[in-house]
């Protein structure tokens, strides 16, 4: 069956460290993968998109990698700050290119 | 742009009542998505429209759920009759889907539905 797994439900790290979140998938062949941030009581907000033919994408302190052989994406936040505390969701397209299936999310807490 | 607008933000209703959730997508976006989010099941796609036409409604739980998009600037999700298990946060999202549909989705603030 198709499955998207994010490494853990919760991750606590110290301010200034690099946070690494994992997204693994099975029985999908996504053309692209996206990462979203969700704060309590709000809708998800798009952060980054990476295509199947791209290995790495960066945006400011964020970096995403995509390994279609391992069927895995890693999401890094460098020099983390308490304001980065949120739930991070990975999503990949399934079926139609427009449809996204979301993972269950990882709740990141950056401790001051 | 005001972003995706959803109403109401909160809805409390009794079992058996009809519930209508509303969404106004971002102007110019041609794809619209309805999601449901619960702690147990996470964020689930219910239905999506492209150019006002329903493309895939395989995520709609059952016949009690229906969705319409009469024009490019308005969509509704209706539950009739509502049941306690429908309690969740319902999100609407819109996207400017290009030929290959890679574009990101913009989510509204959600409607928190409680069915008692």
Image (tube, coloured by chain):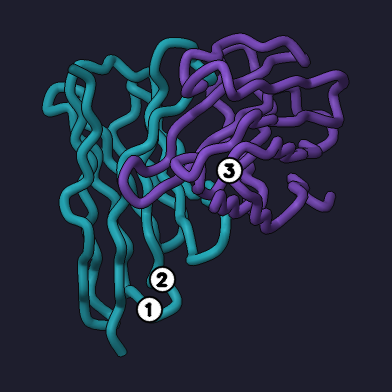
Q: Pointer 2: residues within 10 angstroms few (<14), some, or many (20+)?
A: some
Chain label for disc 2: A
Q: Do the residues labelled 1 and 2 touch (CB within 8 Å)?
A: yes
Q: Pointer 1: residues within 10 angstroms few (<14), some, or many (20+)?
A: some
Instruction: Look at chain B in the picture and name its colour.
Output: purple
Q: In this view, does B50 lie above or below B82?
A: above
Residue B97 left/right relative to A96: right
Q: Which residue is drawn at 70% across and 57% down?
A: B9
Q: How many labels does the image show?
A: 3
Chain label for disc 1: A
Name the quadrant containing residue A18: bottom left
Q: Where is residue A106 in the image (x, y as percent from the top left)?
A: 28, 56
Q: Distance between the residues labelled 1 and 3?
A: 44 Å
Circle nearer the viewer, 1 or 3: 3
Q: Mark 2 points at which residue?
A: A84
Q: Residue at x 59, y 36 (%)?
A: B82
Instruction: Look at chain A in the picture and name its colour.
Output: cyan
Q: Nearer the viewer, residue A78 or B31?
A: B31
Q: Mark 3 points at which residue?
A: B15
């Amino acid at each position: 069956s198709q499955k998207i797994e994010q490494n853990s439900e919760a991750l606590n790290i110290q301010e200034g460290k690099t946070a690494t979140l994992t997204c693994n998938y099975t029985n999908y062949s996504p053309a692209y993968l996206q990462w979203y941030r969700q704060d309590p009581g709000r809708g998800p907000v798009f952060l980054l998109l990476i295509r199947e033919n791209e290995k790495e994408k960066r945006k400011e302190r964020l970096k995403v990698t995509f390994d279609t052989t391992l069927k895995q994406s890693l999401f890094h936040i460098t020099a983390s700050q308490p304001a980065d505390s949120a739930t991070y969701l990975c999503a990949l397209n399934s079926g139609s290119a427009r449809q996204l299936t979301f993972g269950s999310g990882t709740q990141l807490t950056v401790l001051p | 742009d005001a972003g995706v607008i959803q109403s109401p933000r909160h809805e409390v209703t009794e079992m058996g009542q009809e519930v209508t959730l509303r969404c106004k997508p971002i102007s110019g976006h041609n794809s619209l998505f309805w999601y449901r989010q619960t702690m147990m099941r996470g964020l689930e796609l219910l239905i999506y429209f492209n150019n006002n036409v329903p493309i895939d409604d395989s995520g709609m739980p059952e016949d009690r759920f229906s969705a319409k998009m009469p024009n490019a600037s308005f969509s509704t999700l209706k539950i009739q009759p509502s049941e306690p298990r429908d309690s969740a946060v319902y999100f609407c999202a819109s996207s400017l889907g290009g030929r290959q549909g890679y574009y990101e989705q913009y989510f509204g603030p959600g409607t928190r539905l409680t069915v008692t």
